[in-house]
Amino acid sequence: EVQLVESGGTVVQPGGSLRLLCAASGFTFDDYAMHWVRQRPGKGLEWVSLLSWDGGVTYYAASVKGRFTISRDNSRNSLYLQMNSLRPEDTALYFCAKNGLGDGYNFDSWGQGTLVTVSS
Amino acid sequence: QSALTQPPSASGSPGQSVTISCTGTSSDVGGYKYVSWYQQYPGKAPKLLIYDVNKRPSGVPDRFSGSKSGNTASLTVSGLQADDEADYYCSSYAGTSYVFGTGTKVTVL
């Protein structure tokens, strides 16, 4: 069974930094691209970033480009999101998601999320 | 990349059908065959219902179906059941990014 467990969310001041972790199990981690998706309180889903299976390809949403960095350690079955220059609008529940079925342009498994609050 | 447009709410009685639209542009929904749909209960993670416009993952009932015409995709839930009451989101690949819909809250009357 696929399991994705996010951690690292906490309260951080504007301008601060945070690193999120997603621990994966139940599948061959280095066969799949991985994503981060966020959901602001009471709002909809927003795709944040994609990292290819080998770390060679990264995509970012315009709202986080230049501030967030996605990375992975396939030896540890782990996905990371380094978040710098945090803003109040980055407050959200951050999900990691496994690249999906068919041609892969979907999110077929999700973690439960980790909450990041940016506030002074 | 702007969010795809969904109606904020939809409703139906048990046994009826409800269809949710998802409107984008030629740069996302209209340009690729990679529309997916997700169901989310309050406080829970989203669950994949439909991928590649009209394919269902194993375990998803055939009451859920997807389609696309031009820049608009649709999700139909047939034979509505009480536990279909949830939020539904579409998503589309958009080249070097992904975009989600604004979300639709489905109420079973």
Image (spheres, coloured by chain):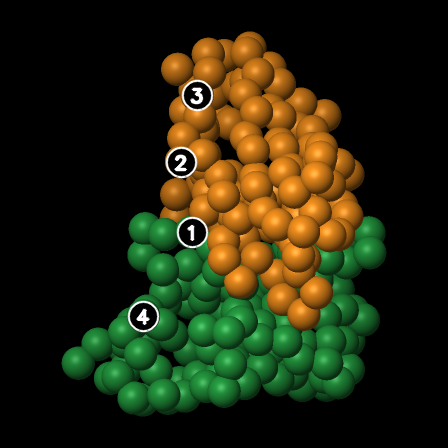
Chain colours: A green, B orange
The percent position of residue A102, horizontal first and vertical second, equals 82, 51
Question: Is A14 displayed left or right of B101 in the figure?
Answer: left
State the image coordinates of residue A13 (x, y, percent, origin top left): 24, 84
Q: Circle 1 sits on which residue? A: A44
Q: Residue at x 45, y 86 (%)?
A: A67
In the rendered view, would you say B98 is above or below A30?
A: above
Is residue A43 in sight in this rendering? yes
Q: Residues within 10 Å of mark 4 (few under 14, many from 20)?
A: few
Label whose residue precedes the other's in the sequence (1 or 4): 1
Disc 2 from disc 1: Cα separation: 11 Å
Residue beneath disc 2:
B8
Label 3 element class: strand
Q: Amino acid at mark 3?
A: Ser
Q: Quadrant of residue B63?
A: top right
Q: CA distance from mark 3 to mark 4?
A: 31 Å
Question: In screen coordinates, is A3 left or right of B6?
Answer: right
Q: Nearest the camera: A108 or A85?
A: A85
Type of amino acid under label 2: Pro
Reading the image, the residue beneath label 3 is B11
- Near mark 2 (Cα within 10 A), the count class, few <14, some 14-19 or many ≥20, is few
Vertical relation: A62 (above or below) A107: below
Q: Amino acid at mark 4?
A: Glu
Q: Amino acid at mark 1?
A: Gly
Task: Say whether residue B40 is visible.
Answer: no
Q: Residue at x 64, y 72 (%)?
A: A50
Q: CA distance from mark 1 to mark 3?
A: 19 Å
Tag 3: Cα neighbours inside 10 Å, few (<14), some, or many (≥20)?
some
Quadrant location of the C terminus of chain B in the rendered image: top left
Give the labeled residue for mark 4: A89
Please give the chain letter of the residue carrying mark 2: B
